[in-house]
Image (cartoon, grey):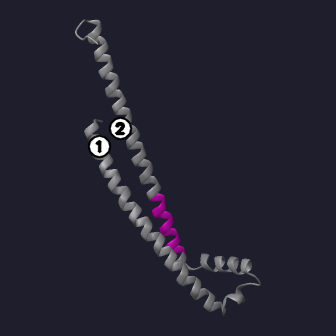
Amino acid sequence: MTIAEITLTLIRLRTELSSTQARAADAKMTLRHVTADRETALIAAAGGDKTLGANADARARALLLLLDADPAYTHARDAHAETDRLMRMSQVELDCARDQRECIRWEIRERHLDAMALATVHGLYDAS
């Protein structure tokens, strides 16, 4: 792969990462809204927050169990988890492409130094 090809790959991967980050942010916001909506509805359906448990910890646990059984919440939670996973994978792909570019750069430097050394040995290059 050439520097030009890897540069185009990096541009594509940066664009994909940016798009994935936007989708992940949207999914996070959606999850926050769905969570608030479903918590309110579930508390109201239970007859108020005091009916969910004797103390705040018990109510939080009961609400968590109710949310985990709610299809709208689980769909939003799973969508957020998936976009977050995709975002992390996009970042890894971008990092790998950057590493590949750096390897190509070092290979070019190495070939350049080898050519200079060979030219010096044959008297075609004066390093001074």
Residue shown at 38% from the left, 35% from the top: 102
Residue shown at 59% from the left, 83% from the top: 39
Q: Is the residue under label 2 in contact with that under label 1 (CB below 8 Å)?
A: yes
Left or right of 97 on screen, residue 75: right
Residue shown at 66% from the left, 77% from the top: 65
Q: Position of residue 94 (x, y in %)?
A: 39, 48
Left or right of 7 on screen, residue 44: right
Residues shaded magenta: 74-86
Question: On the image, which quarter does residue 51 sit in?
Answer: bottom right
Which residue has dot 2 on it?
101
Q: Along the polypeptide, which appears first: circle 1 or circle 2?
A: 1
Q: Secondary structure at mark 1?
A: helix
Q: Secondary structure at mark 2?
A: helix
Q: Is residue 9 above or below residue 73?
A: above
**The N terminus: image quadrant:** top left
How far apart are the alpha carbons under marks 1 and 2? Answer: 8 Å
Q: Is residue 99 above or below residue 91?
A: above
Q: Position of residue 21 (x, y in %)?
A: 41, 61
Which residue has dot 1 on it?
7
Q: Indicate yes or no whether the magenta region holds residue 79.
A: yes
